[in-house]
Amino acid sequence: MPEKVNVALAQISCKVGDKKHNINVMKNNIKRAKEKGANLVIFPELSLTGYLNRDLAYELAEPIPGSSIYSLEETAKKENIYIVFGMPEQSEKAHAVLYNTAVLLGPDGLIGKYRKMHLPTHSVFEEKRYFRLGYEAPVFETEIGKMGLTICYDMFFPEISRLLRLKGSQLIVCISASPAVRSRFFEVFTAARALENTVFLAYVNLVGVENGLQFWGGSRIIAPDGSILAKANYDEEDLVIGTIDYADLERAEAFVPTLRDLRPELFNSLREQAEKL
Amino acid sequence: MSTLKLTSDVLKLDLPSVENRIKRFVKDYVEKCGADGVVLGASGGLDSSATAALASLSLGGHKVLGIAMPEEETYDVTDIQHAKLLAKKFDFNLQIVDISSTLKACFQSLPIYDVADKLSKGNVKARIRMVYLYYYANKLNRLVCGASDKSEIMVGYFTKWGDGAADISPIMDLYKTQVRQLALHIGVPAEIVAKPPSPRLWPNQLAEKELGIKYETLDLILFGLEHFMKSKEIAEQLKLPIKLVEDVKRRWLVTEHKRRLPLTTKLGYRTIGKDFRLPHKPY
């Protein structure tokens, strides 16, 4: 496994409901990212379809693997690159059961997927109306490191990033569709999740306007010491690359040893109290 | 007790950011619709001036057409002068269309017309203006750009399907006092910003007099309601009679019908306005 990995943050805007267009945009960005030396290219949440699909989600969702996966797998193989993107996933067992899913593809094809565990259903968000909660937080062991995936609102909950770190993640990817009024939350949470777990965190947010919501971009890679290694522009499409060096993990862990100082006995109490909330 | 303090500070805006977001929103939507620009009512008042200025800054003045629609009963030469001043400053086209004869014909043809019922009569004026705007929009492949602000929409101080009818309403998430800030920031002449708001539905109509409250106070009450504050707490913080706050709250709640599609009863599998939930502009 290489010590250093070049991660491309592909901060795109999507056409709602137009998978063909969005796949073309993704393929174009993958090619450009590869030309810039990227090993991994990350796209925003639901980048296959756009975020605010509402009832169209039922016809846009695909099983995994499905036709869109096959199409992007070809590109991953051709460009010899890893890809993370978001899509509405249809259960193979029940067609109206959908998940808000992040997919990881590699040079050999589909590696795995993560189904969003925290679905915002408040304010302008209505994800629980359409999506079922995910129940697993897998860590994928790849040629470019051990990687865990998260999606947007997951950042508000420290548990999932911690779990991924305890399962061995070196890099946590967060794909997002965050509107502008929430930028200050993500600026804080992304840094906090990286610091408290001494882990690399790559956050990729959508841009563009959907249904009056303006997605703010601001994608970034955060080092285990909280420093920002790469940062995309706000409010416009961008493609930036940052290099992560896994050797930095050890130094960060020694400097602020949050993992060593964990108190697992608190977790039971947390569960008890949360159940009684 | 809430830590949210209802002072004028809570209504302060990050003006460059708000300006950019509104400009981006207008440009994005007009482009997605394939429209050639916008038409808007150019009354010479604060809201329409701020909206016309923002649309011009967003799309370029050549894609903005302001229509001033005076009528003899509420004619005010200053309004026309202000509309012209603004059009010149922001380089958009202005047409002046007198709607007096249309209004007269409309009233004369109404079998139950009652000259003393100024509200029903006034609402016809707002709706006739809407008809004109949509004619221009259809004819010129443009969108109708509304100029309602959040204060007026929240308390229902607008004519349903009249000035409330539009394809986009760029300043609808800003309270009146916030529109004043933004208007000054983008260069709307101070004399327009300082003018007492009026819908011009009948002579000498003044919004604050009719509403019975200054916008500075109304906006803070509405801000509190927006942020889930209880009437009692709002009244205590603003040192207002609880009845005044409750009246504003009541106005807000009973006018929800003006902000929605027409109500129907659910009969089908998916119902318009209820559980037919589609993207606003999918392609």
Image (cartoon, rainbow, N blue to C red):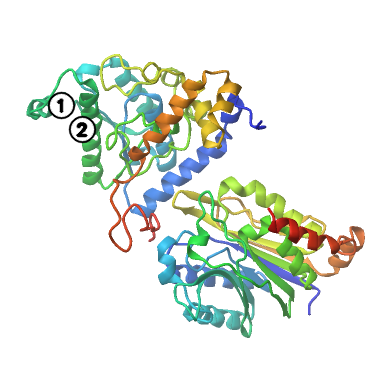
Residue A222 visible in rendering: no
Residue B86 visible in rendering: yes
Q: Is residue B254 above or below residue A241?
A: above
> Which is more toward the observer, A95 or A253?
A95
Disc 2 marks a residue whose amino acid type is Ile
The reply, left or right, for residue B169 in relation to residue A123 is left
Check residue A191 in the rendering and tell me which mark sits there, or answer none.
none
Q: Is residue B270 above or below residue A183?
A: below
Check residue B128 in the rendering and tell me which mark sits there, or answer none.
2
> Which is more toward the observer, B81 or A215?
A215
Q: Within 10 Å of the Cα at label 1, are there few (<14), some (14-19), or many (20+) other Cα atoms?
A: some
Q: Chain of mark 1?
A: B
Q: Where on the picture, by quarter, is residue B101?
A: top left
Check residue B103 in the rendering and tell me which mark sits there, or answer none.
1
Q: Measured from the top left, where is residue B122 in percent x and y?
A: 24, 24
Looking at the image, which residue sits at the far front? A276
Residue at left 56%, top 63%?
A45
Residue at left 64%, top 57%?
A219
